Image (tube, helix red, strand yellow):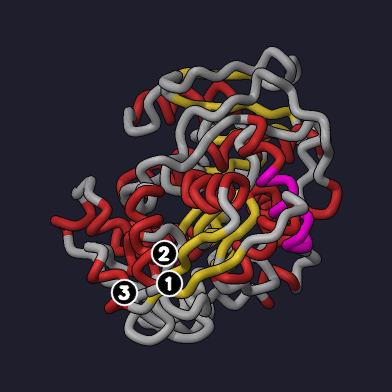
Amino acid sequence: MARALVIGGTGFVGRHAVANLDGHGYDVTSLGRGGHPFDFDDWPDVEQRRGDRTDPQVIEDVARGLEPDVVVDCAAFHPSDVRRATEAFADADAYVLVSSGGAYADQDIPKREDETRLHDCTPEQAADDTMATYGPRKAECDRIAREAAERGVAATSVRSTVVYGPQTISEAGDGGAGWADEIPAAWTHGDAPGLQSHHDYWIHRVARHDRVVVPGDGTAIWHRVFVGDLAEALRVVAERGVPGEAYNAADRTVCTLADVVALIAGALDTDVEVVQASERDLANAGLDPGDFPLYHHPMTGYPHVLDTCKLASLGWESTPPERAIERTVEESIAGDRDGSGWGPERDVEERLLDAVDG
């Protein structure tokens, strides 16, 4: 049985990666700092190790003691993390870095792995911890993975866009079209604000109200990826990816913000009126289009779209959006989350609706 190590295995993406690998016959070990209220009681075959991946000794000890065949790195946020990991796991059959579409500097539509320019990264940015340098840091992480591949390390990277989906994990952990319905209670959410929380906001709005405000004309596009499909992509790239290559991971169907709201309404079997609000309407209410989750201005900000043909060529498929949203809505409602803090308060939205109605 092949041994797999998931660094950051208790995080949102990490726990799905653990489940997917376990469901496909790997002997899985999760490495994390232990800061999440999370355990593996329902997954007795998964070993959990605690340690800070930024500590060189922790990585060296795990590499020497475990000797994993596959390493999936979900917690590399600085170039030094990747440099250390690719050195420690140089003999692994596959090292897969979880990167980001934020690594791209140019606003190509779509962004392609081998064509779209990546951000530069200064030494100061490489050591920074703020979101302002996230893209440059991820771009530099990608370059280090590619350089490691040139030295003979089986290193690849997967550039994902904004991740959504259930924060609990299906028992089978298959991802993609094989996503199961059983949800072990132990797999509870402990981290990922700004990922699923963005969708929680819209789910709560559609579930509770028959009219919701959408900024602009609803055509804003921020490409997303279902978390089960991302987990599947990480395993597929580990098994079939070419060292030194990067692979974009995103839904094969690109949805506008209005599409997302309509899919949520369909999953809830309800009707909702989408009220379009211009920038002037929003400004009169003290709002900006960017105050709404998942908004990406279709003109000044450009749609954020990733080309996924390269990943699909490895045999990867994405879950149909209707099923992915259904699964996301189901778990969000069960978790009683409302996405508070990720969009305008309802009383502000009500005043805006009254203003738009005239």
Question: Element under label 1?
Answer: helix
At x 64% / y 25%, what residue is drawn?
Answer: 187
Which residues make up the magenta segment? 318-329
Question: Element under label 2?
Answer: helix
Q: Quadrant of the C terminus?
A: bottom left
Residue 13 makes an appearance in the image: yes
Q: Position of residue 206 (x, y in %)?
A: 59, 52
Residue 91 makes an appearance in the image: no
Query: Where on the picture, by quarter, is residue 223?
Result: bottom right
Q: Tag 2: Cα neighbours inside 10 Å, few (<14), some, or many (≥20)?
A: some
Query: Where on the picture, by quarter, is residue 172?
Result: top right
Would residue 34 appear left or right of 307 to someone viewing this image? left
Q: Above or below — where is 320 with respect to 186?
A: below
Discs 1/2, front: 1
Q: Quadrant of the N terminus?
A: top right
Q: Position of residue 4 (x, y in %)?
A: 66, 35
319 is within the stretch colored magenta: yes
Residue 353, label in figure: 2
Identify which amino acid the numbered label 3 is placed on. Answer: Asp
Residue 48, label in figure: none
56 is within the stretch colored magenta: no
At x 24% / y 65%, what residue is drawn?
Answer: 121
Q: Which of the pair 85/128 is nearer the observer?
A: 128
Instruction: Report the Cα–Cα distance between label 2 and label 3.
Output: 9 Å
Instruction: Report the Cα–Cα distance between label 1 and label 2.
Output: 6 Å
Instruction: Identify the residue position indicated by label 1 in the image.
Output: 357
At x 57% / y 38%, what residue is drawn?
Answer: 14
Instruction: Identify the residue position indicated by label 3 in the image.
Output: 281
